[in-house]
Amino acid sequence: MIDHTGVNVSDYGKSRAFYLAALGAIGYGIVKEFPASVTGSTDVAGFGPPGKPDFWVIRGVPNQPPIHVAFRVDSREEVDAFYRAAIAAGGRDNGGPGIRAHYHPDYYGAFVLDPDGHNIEAVCHKPG
């Protein structure tokens, strides 16, 4: 079971704003945030549902190659809201909302590239 994960980003402020908007559409917010003066090395923000940061954004050299992170949501409407919010926040389309039947008949996902090219997805596995 995965407890948490994160991505290194080149522009912390820009990525923080992107993820705040994109993940806010699926109920995530900043749960914890620490400046370099506290961590001893870099700025970090932990996003998640209230009370539990499970996705961290870390100022640094972006992961190469870019990584893929998928957030499971409860409805197709949340997938759509994530996609709209991520695009409005500067994300780039990497596959709009829709069924991906090659995974399974109810796989409904949307993919965006964050400011550093990481492939970020929201996915619902429930029937429409």
Image (cartoon, helix red, strand yellow):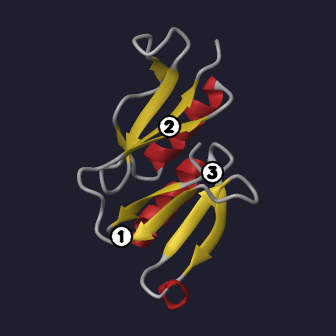
Upstream in the sequence, badge 2 or badge 1? 1
Q: Which residue is painted at 52% across and 61% down in the image? A: 56
Determine whether 25 is above or below 124 in the image: below
Mark 3–mark 2 CB contact (< 8 Å): no
Around disc 3, counting alpha carbons within 10 Å, would you say few (fewer than 14), some (14 to 19), or many (20 or more)? some
Disc 1 crowd rating (10 Å Cα; few below 14, some 14-19, many 20+) is: some
Mark number for residue 24? 3
Alpha carbon separation for disc pair 3 and 1: 19 Å
Q: Mark 1 is on which residue type?
A: Asp
Q: Is residue 100 left or right of residue 116?
A: right
Instruction: Identify the mark at residue 83; answer none if there is no mark.
Output: 2
**Residue for badge 1:** 11
Question: Percent x, y for residue 25?
Answer: 62, 45
- Residue at the right extreme? 51
| Residue 9 vs residue 39, the one in the foreground | 39
Q: Secondary structure at mark 2?
A: helix
- Tell me residue 47's x, y (percent): 60, 59
Residue 100, image quadrant: top left
Q: How many marks?
A: 3
Q: Residue furthest front?
A: 1
Q: Quadrant of the C terminus?
A: top right
- Asked whether, in this view, residue 17 is left or right of residue 73, the answer is left
* Secondary structure state at the residue bearing disc 1: loop
Toward which corner of the image does residue 64 lie, by quadrant? bottom left
For the point 39% across and 12% down, which residue is it?
Answer: 102
Q: Label 3 sits on what residue type? A: Gly
Q: CA distance from mark 3 to mark 2?
A: 11 Å
